[in-house]
Amino acid sequence: MSTTAFEPEFMRIGVLTAALQELTSRERRDPDPDLAIEEWLEFAAELEVECIQLASALHPDESDIPPEAMLDPVANTLDLRTPFDATRARRVRAATKATGVEIADLGFFDNMLHEEAAVRAKKHAFLLRVFDAAVLLEVPAVCGFVGRNQKLSMDQNLQDFEESFIPLLQEAKARGLEYRIEQCPMPGWTSGDAFHNNIAYTPGTWVALHRICEKHGVGDQLRIHYDPSHAILMGQDTRAIFQWLKDEGYGFLISGFHVKGQVIDSRGVAAWGYGGQTVERGDWVDGAPSANPADQANAWKKQTVLCEHELPGTARHDPLAYLQNRSVDWLDHQLAARELLDLDVANTPLIVEHEYPPARVQERDALLPILKGSIAFTRHIDRAAASMFALHREVLPAQGIPVQGIGRQAYRS
């Protein structure tokens, strides 16, 4: 009898450092910025992850968006106010070696197509500094957004992408880097009516953008850091997205994952639909966008009125929600990735991103068991999916044994 060994392949489990933004206090980190990275790597080792996604951002003193206006304030664990040089890189690499925790990629999540030229130039210059830091840290990729020019239509944004973003990807190519796009539509980025403020929010635009990249010789630089929470926000499900990419010949586009869920509030959908709250949010005062940053945060009601982010493992299992694409079916998510995408599984990062509001405690000892539990859940789910895949695709077929049942199917209604 022909047999095949049971050899499941597991993904690398990691965490985004924005989960604990001020692990190292400003008083300690501002004069010694790389201390924040060292202490996060030590924290990650306690969390028992293989890697981190190292968050970078414009320092709060330099950012054009006040923290009060953000749904999930970003973290500049990687502080680039001063040049990240070889000396700094050696210090960080020594910390990765000491802790055994690698850096999967660097994250800089901002609007790279900002409509104001001076603001855009500042963000582009910062991204180039992130690219340079990635090279010095021997990290293969940078993760971020494309964004949207609010003065242009979506089609015009494709042209803007070609004119202004392609040069950034050419810089990435010159450094041997990938740029991995997270697909959040960022509806609360503006108090206007636009919901899709990151044009790379869906597979249809990923393909449109990639075709532009191919035309300019940077197709290998543009990849997707897939986050299922944003698919749920769009009314999509992971298996159908992956199947569509495979059908279209783009199963190679996804090269990393955020592990973050979304739980849809059916009552909010009943009131506002999937377009979110459109009026009387509180971000407009006297007929104009409020000048108060805290009021501007109400623009996020476009999203939060109908859903809430899930930290994996913290939401109750709800089979009906899965069938309605109103929550993430984590096991099928990991199984579908293996079945439908072109992945180097062992080298694919699976990054836990913590944005579940009630559990976003910013005190180290309180957050530790929450993150540790979610990371354990994520690891077990990935191992379960890997085991199923090995049995279904390798072990049973080698002995001519059929796989039972049907499972979830793409496009089924």
Image (cartoon, rainbow, N blue to C red):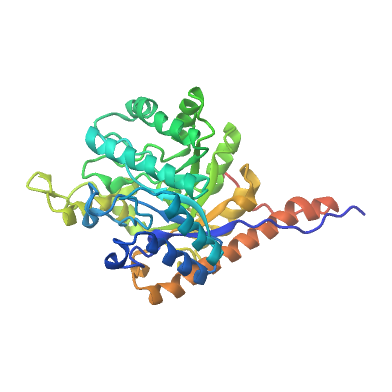
The x, y position of residue 399, in whole percent, is 86, 53
In the displayed image of the protein, which residue is found farthest to the top? Answer: 215
Which residue is painted at 39% across and 26% down in the image? 162
Is residue 389 rendered to the left or right of residue 21? right
The x, y position of residue 12, in whole percent, is 58, 57
Which residue is painted at 34% across and 55% down in the image? 76
Assign the C terminus to one quadrant of the image: top right
Q: Nearer the viewer, residue 174 or 288?
A: 174
Among the 4 quarters of the image, the one containing residue 120:
top left
20 up-or-down from 217: above or below: below
Is residue 150 rendered to the left or right of residue 293? right
In the displayed image of the protein, which residue is found farthest to the right? Answer: 1
In the displayed image of the protein, which residue is found farthest to the bottom? Answer: 365
Q: Nearer the viewer, residue 239 or 140?
A: 140
The answer to whether residue 164 shows anywhere in this view is yes
Assign the N terminus to one quadrant of the image: bottom right
Q: Nearer the viewer, residue 150 or 308?
A: 150
301 up-or-down from 99: above or below: above
The answer to whether residue 408 shows anywhere in this view is no
In the displayed image of the protein, which residue is found farthest to the left? Answer: 286
215 up-or-down from 107: above or below: above
The x, y position of residue 91, in whole percent, is 46, 59
What is the number of callouts on the image?
0
Which residue is painted at 34% across and 62% down in the image? 21
The x, y position of residue 267, in whole percent, is 33, 58
Is residue 54 rendered to the left or right of residue 270? right
